[in-house]
Image: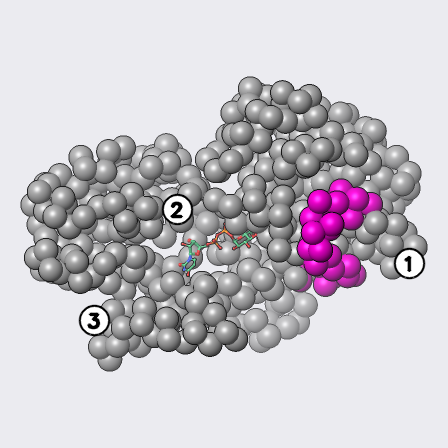
Amino acid sequence: MRLSVVGCGYLGAVHAAAMASIGHEVVGIDVDPRKIASLTRGEAPFFEPGLQDLLSEGLASGRLTFTTSIAAAAGAAVHFIGVGTPQQAGGYAADLTYVNTAVDSLLPYLAPGDVVAGKSTVPVGTTAELAPRVSATGATLVWNPEFLREGWAVQDTIDPDRLVAGVPAGLEGERAADILREVYRPAVDKRTPFIVTDYATAELVKVAANAFLATKISFINAMAEIAEVTGADVTQLADAIGHDARIGRKFLGAGIGFGGGCLPKDIRAFAARAEELGRRESVNFLREVDAINLRRRDRAVQLVVDGLGGSVFGKKVAMLGAAFKPHSDDVRDSPALDVAVQLNGLGADVVVTDPQAIENARRIHPQLTYEADRDVTIRNADAIVMVTEWDEYRRHLSPEHASSLTRGRVIVDGRNGLDADAWRAAGWKYVGMGRP
Ligand code: UGA
């Protein structure tokens, strides 16, 4: 099928490349000429495992092209909208400027029977508001939310755990759902659940999923807070409750909490939307989820201060990690960087390392010192703080090796990912989060 993808950021670029890889003819469109130039050269504008290969294959096959011209969307049967919906400046609601602009710019190039499939995360009610503009061209608007995780984006796009399509009522909606089934044929043939809903449900599925994940993380971090005043160990607690299949161990990793371009802004936008709908109280807990999450960053800072005897002033603190999670170079709302910035503000000599995210981190926090090499980063450090659980730090840094480089023997494990016993046995003061 011929597809267009409007917006070539994280979501759009991966979607375009993935759709080409399953046999579609795809044009990716973005207003940013630098992004398009990079994609056209076959260079992913961000780090995402597997994307580079997919881009090269797609470009070489001729099935994947990129352009800044929205006119190139003409002739495609399905037009995906994958632009960003960031948090509004000065507020909690989502900024829908890019979605509105993308839809409006597409209108002149739509033909009767086309499907416009929104993938961006939008507040419930957005699709119904946009639909009349699309319907006026004879095309059909559907909302087809995306559940990909950064770091696993390619796999999640090609082989998702479910597909959701919010469609208008009646024959028009059924036909649009069939067209989407055709787009996702390989996944549908594998019996991937394909759930057809109305607009509001599809929009809510997306925000509800992220709200649930954020709540799960903050739940375990709340337990970490209680563990800290009782001497309990939150990781053992998570293991034990995780054996209950109804609870499950995934997303019960206590530590410095969640960040990134999705969870934080999505729960805030959800709370803001609920308030507009007169249902503030229904999701009031999300404000707590947010507050617990942010408190854990402060807690990590406190643990470093305490670990260094009450002050970090003039002490060298080596930060292992800058990205909001491993396998990503994304530093949007990164808890790791937040902790680094706070320690820097307290007068610590902070040096940050990360296998992928240094350039992005430097752009938003040029006041910090960055070092590509892990061992140079920890050399002469008074304390090490592990804040992004890359294997390079979690698995491949032995306490013995660290001892040969550092000045101090304090390690704060912001992700509860290190072997506490091994570090202690090597003479280190190991400090986990929510662990004795
Ligand atoms: C999240 C969702 O997981 C995806 O399903 C969704 O599609 C995506 O947002 C989106 O809306 O686009 P992502 O932001 O890539 O994906 O990252 P996650 O893997 O969810 O991790 C989010 C944050 O939670 C990270 O900072 C991670 O370190 C943290 N986390 C995760 C924990 O602190 N503890 C855990 O147990 C798990």
Q: Which residues are magenta?
A: 179-204
Residue corresponding to mark 2: 326
Q: Disc number at residue 170?
A: 1
Q: Main secondary structure of the magenta part?
A: helix
Residue topped by disc 3: 436
Q: Residues within 10 Å of mark 2 (few under 14, many from 20)?
A: many
Residue 193: say if magenta.
Answer: yes
> Of residues 422 and 372, which is closer to you in this image?
422
> Mark 2–mark 3 contact, CB under 8 Å?
no
Q: Earlier in the sequence, mark 2 or mark 3?
A: 2
Q: Nearer the viewer, residue 176 or 313?
A: 176
The residues bearing labels 2 and 1 have C-alpha atoms spaced at a distance of: 44 Å
The answer to if 402 sits in the magenta stretch is: no
Say whether mark 2 is within 8 Å of ligand 1.
yes
Q: Of the residues shown, which amino acid type is indicated by label 2?
A: Pro
Location of residue 376 in the rendering, given as x and y in whole percent from the top left corner: 18, 35
Please tell me the numbered disc located at residue 339: none
